[in-house]
Amino acid sequence: MNRFMLFFHKTGSPPWFYGFAGKLIPWLWAGFIILTAIGLYMGLVLAPPDYQQGESVRIMYVHVPAAWMSMMIYAMMAVMGFIALVWRIRIMEVMMISSAPIGAAFTVIALVSGSMWGRPTWGTYWVWDARMTSELVLLFLYIGVIALYNAYDEPRKAAKAASLMAIVGAVNLPIIHFSVLWWNTLHQGSSFSADGSSIHASMLWPLLLMAFAFKFYYGANLLSRARLRLLKQDHRKRWAQEVIAEGLLAGGAK
Amino acid sequence: MSRPALSTAFMALLRRDFLLAYRRRAELLQPLVFLLVVVTLFPLGVGPSPQLLANIAPGVIWIAALLASVLSLDSLFRSDYEDGTLEQMVLSGQPLALIALARIVAHWLVAGLPIVILSPVLALWMNLPEEGVPVLLKSLVIGTPVLSLIGAIGAALTVSLKRGGQLLSLLVFPLYVPLLILATSAVSSAVAGLPYNGQLGLILAGLIGALTLAPFATATALKLSLS
């Protein structure tokens, strides 16, 4: 077996994954904190105010990356759900459902920060604009997946049902997006296209840094949640009891 | 024992479902009465102004159709699940997607088609201009099967849960958004004298897409619920 396959099979084992993720998490947090610090400094201090939107453009450095994350995480959930259903890898089931609350939180952040930006710029907190509406529908899809998971008692069955729901939602999401876009639009078009971006570098860099920072946050948060969920599901198994006993010992020694 | 042909199995299931539906006539009427009641509430709520009612008519009728369809979807697989019929169907060796499709077709014929037939009355109540009525009918004819197809996935996912009904509506309503937008826009365009074939074409595309994919997703969900 080559190295990659060995690594692949190892990550499928809960104790190994638990240890490996535990080592990775501090690095991800570090990446998140450093990138956020630089990104926010560039965005809130160095970047110029917009000639039309004024200072409120700075909300964009959180709003746009959060909206990107909300869509990326849903796509990730569909991919992980597919892997979970086809190859029945338990770690993937755990990762899929652990992603859902993070994605839902990013969706809420995108909606709330968008409302806060809309008040001074458009003069209203909420309009039934295409992108806002499809973001709201996305939030409902997230809530649906989480609610379906919670409705089942048996975690593996719950994860499989939630995975299927995530896949069905992902198939529909582009259709929902384009139908809503066609229905009503007030939002500015995307500033990014295949030809490059229409944003000046002084505003583009903090935006991209924040986007990467959020990805590190997702990684760190996801792995922490997945570890905890695994520990909870396996709390009767030996490896989990060893981990818990170690944690109690370390806590007692302090 | 040899396996009967696919078409034989399909027709047998369909016949069984019609017989069951016929014996439970009163239950079938409930979603339709619900539809009528919901549409009645709108003039009472927003006022009887004919112009206002005409403006919101396509949306109101379609939303009422969505609600009525979800109401009847909850019981799509429930009784078969509870008495073990569903398990026997899975064991029968027939493709589960085909069985699911037969159930969906039967559901549309007993729950979706009556909505279509009832809709001219609703259009009359809501003061929808005459130009809109044929388009409303067309949009319902090709749109309500999509409701049954997508809804069946949700019904299959929630069939083993005790209180699946509320969850079912949470799961499927977001998926109905494109259909609602296209259908109401087609009717409004027709009333305004604008072309509406594009919207109807897109709904038809959605129907074909759902018809090819939804039975398989429903079958997967049923297997999950039985595991």
Image (tube, helix red, strand yellow):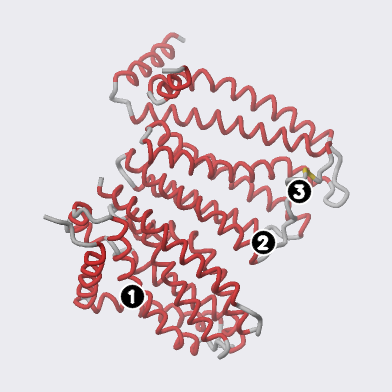
Task: Judge depth for marks 1 and 2 and give the one in front.
Answer: 1
The N terminus of chain A: image quadrant: top left
Q: Quadrant of residue A18?
A: top left
In the rendered image, which residue does mark 3 sit on? Answer: A191
**Residue B109's mark?**
1
Task: Name the residue located 59 percent from the left edge and 44 percent from the top edge.
Answer: A70
Give the farthest residue toward the top: A253
The Cα–Cα distance between marks 1 and 2, rounded to whole angstroms, is 36 Å
Task: Judge depth for marks 2 and 3 and give the one in front.
Answer: 3
**Mark 1 Cα within 10 Å, few/some/many (few <14, many 20+)?**
some
Task: Name the residue located 79 percent from the left edge and 46 percent from the top edge.
Answer: A57
Chain letter for mark 2:
A
In the rendered image, which residue does mark 2 sit on? Answer: A129
Whole-percent x and y of residue A248? 39, 15
**Residue B97's mark?**
none
Element at label 1: helix
The Cα–Cα distance between marks 1 and 3, rounded to whole angstroms, is 47 Å
Above or below: residue B79 compared with residue B87: below
Element at label 3: loop
Chain letter for mark 1:
B
Task: Using the rendered image, report if marks 1 and 2 lie on a common chain.
Answer: no
- N-terminal of the pair, mark 2 or mark 3, is 2
Q: Quadrant of residue B29?
A: bottom left
Q: For the residue marked with disc 2, what is the amino acid? A: Asp
